[in-house]
Image: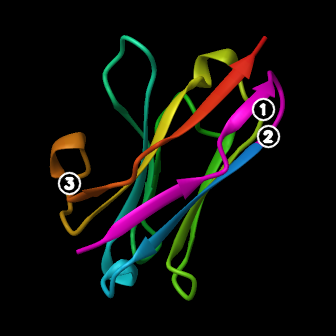
């Protein structure tokens, strides 16, 4: 079993930055692909970014150049640095983990409880 706990959300203004953290428990963290998803009100959950155990990193086009995903295997923690935030980034952000090679809502094995990010204009 893997438990994921997110933190770092909050209310900020457009152009501000936030860093989300996701602390994982479990012995398989270093081998898992870790991902951040988000879900805005009335919309489907969408993939924001993921990071593999090696150099494999992906960003959604909507956040490319503004968000940075990273991981610290020694601390079993994954981060999402969000810069130049926009009102359309407002959503509940979820951390997720999987051993699968295809990353989607359906293939993630474990989910955190989510953290709210609200960006005011």
Position of residue 43 measured from the top left corner of the image (x, y, whole percent): 36, 15
Mark identifier at residue 14: none
Tell me which residue sits at (60%, 17%) in the image: 88
Q: Position of residue 24 (x, y in %)?
A: 44, 72
Q: Magenta residues, as a range? A: 1-17
Pointer 1: what residue?
84
For mark 3, what is the residue? 102
**Label 3: element kind:** loop
Q: In which quadrant will I find the C terminus?
A: top right
Q: Nearer the viewer, mark 3 or mark 2?
A: 2
Specify few, some or many for label 2: CA neighbours under 10 Å numbering under 14, 14-19, or 20 or more: some
95, above or below 56, in the image: above
Q: Quadrant of residue 32?
A: bottom left
* Whether label 1 touches label 3, CB < 8 Å: no
- Secondary structure under the numbered disc 2 in the rendered image: loop
Instruction: Read off the residue under disc 2.
Output: 17
List x then y, in percent, for residue 55: 47, 72
> Camera-side residue: 16 or 4?
4
Closer to the chain start, of discs 3 and 2, is: 2
Q: CA distance from mark 1 to mark 2?
A: 6 Å
Q: Is residue 11 magenta?
A: yes
**The magenta stretch spans residue 96:** no
Q: Are marks 1 and 2 in contact (CB under 8 Å)?
A: yes
Q: Which residue is depicted at the point 67% across and 50% down?
A: 8
């Amino acid at each position: 079993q893997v438990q994921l706990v997110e933190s770092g959300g909050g209310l900020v203004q457009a152009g501000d930055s936030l860093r989300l953290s996701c602390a994982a428990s479990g012995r398989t963290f270093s081998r898992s692909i870790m991902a951040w998803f988000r879900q805005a009100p009335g919309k489907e959950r969408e993939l924001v970014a993921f990071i593999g155990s090696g150099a494999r990193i992906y960003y959604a086009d909507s956040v490319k150049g503004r968000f940075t995903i990273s991981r610290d295997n020694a601390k079993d923690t994954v981060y999402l640095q969000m810069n130049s935030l926009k009102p359309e980034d407002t959503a509940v952000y979820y951390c997720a983990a999987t051993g699968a090679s295809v990353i989607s809502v359906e293939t993630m094995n474990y989910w955190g409880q989510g953290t709210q990010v609200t960006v005011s204009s």
